[in-house]
Image (spheres, rainbow, N blue to C red):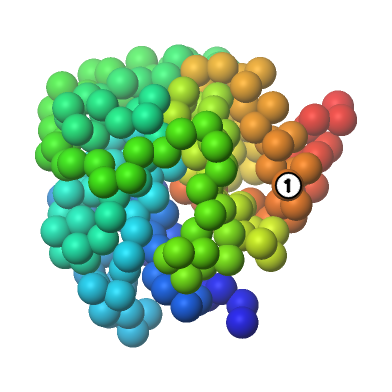
């Protein structure tokens, strides 16, 4: 059976609901998006309590803002890498540096309204490490891989069929990028490229970013070869 992928827009981000023998959610959007998430689940014919796991790809505010709401709604376990754990448990709002001219401008603008953003704290149930986590227990044929670079604790969900859900390890949405490619802000671009290489070697063929539409992993392959 092919894993069913349901994208649910939550603000500027897209969270993904994966359904096979179980249901997991990838990312939780900006703060205050719980009702939008619930409507998205209803449209897909998925009950909130069907969700068993919420994987946060990293600790930036637009990916963890509604994590507490989603956890309360579903009763699911909340998972994030240990390096980004404090962001959700201590309501932190770190910003990565810009790595392109536009990225630097975007982050500078971002800092102006960052004090207005409040992240409701939530308790992490599953602290991810550097080793891969199998999702078989949650009914999904795939695993969570540590793919640092955008943030120290960035992770990706890679299905056995080759679909990679990468958070902000890649971007494909205006006004961030006009074409799919590297994130315009990241802690370590070299580490991003290494994480791309890891995903390709692990069999990724399609990339699902949190910002923008899916694209072929050939984009990553060409960038690494350049």
Name the residue located 34 percent from the left edge and 55 percent from the top edge. Answer: 54
**Circle 1 sits on which residue?**
202
| Tag 1 secondary structure | loop
Quarter placement of the C terminus:
top right
Q: Residue 178, located in which quarter of the rendered image?
A: top right
29 or 129: nearer the viewer: 129
Q: Check the image and report above or below for 137 versus 145.
A: below
Give x and y (percent) for residue 55: 39, 50
Vertical order, 106 against 11 (above or below): above
- Coordinates of residue 64 in the picture (x, y in percent): 28, 42
**Residue 182 left/right relative to 115:** right
Task: Locate residue 216 relative to residue 129 in the image: left or right.
Answer: right
In this image, 186 relative to 112: left or right?
A: right
- Around disc 1, counting alpha carbons within 10 Å, would you say few (fewer than 14), some (14 to 19), or many (20 or more)? some
Whether residue 138 is situated above or below residue 28 in the rendered picture: below
* Occupied quadrant, residue 85: top left
Q: Nearer the viewer, residue 166 or 83?
A: 83
Residue 138, x across and y down, in percent: 43, 65
């Amino acid at each position: 059976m092919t894993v069913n992928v349901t994208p649910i827009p939550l603000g500027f981000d897209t969270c993904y609901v994966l359904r096979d023998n179980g249901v997991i959610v990838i990312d939780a959007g900006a703060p205050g998006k719980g009702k939008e998430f619930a409507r998205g689940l209803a449209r897909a014919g998925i009950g909130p309590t069907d969700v068993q796991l919420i994987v946060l790809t990293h600790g930036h505010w637009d990916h963890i803002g509604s994590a507490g709401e989603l956890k309360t709604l579903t009763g699911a376990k909340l998972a994030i890498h240990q390096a980004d754990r404090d962001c959700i448990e201590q309501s932190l709002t770190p910003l990565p540096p810009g790595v392109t001219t536009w990225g630097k401008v975007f982050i500078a603008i971002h800092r102006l309204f960052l004090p207005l953003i409040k992240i409701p704290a939530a308790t992490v149930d599953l602290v991810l490490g550097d080793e891969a986590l199998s999702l078989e227990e949650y009914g999904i044929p795939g695993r969570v891989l540590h793919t640092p670079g955008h943030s120290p604790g960035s992770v990706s969900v890679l299905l056995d069929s080759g679909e990679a859900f990468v958070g902000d390890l890649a971007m494909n949405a205006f006004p961030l990028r006009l074409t799919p490619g590297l994130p315009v802000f990241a802690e370590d671009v070299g580490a991003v490229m290494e994480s791309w290489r890891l995903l390709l070697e692990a069999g990724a063929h399609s990339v699902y970013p949190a910002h923008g539409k899916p694209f072929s992993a050939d984009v990553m392959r060409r960038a690494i070869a350049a």
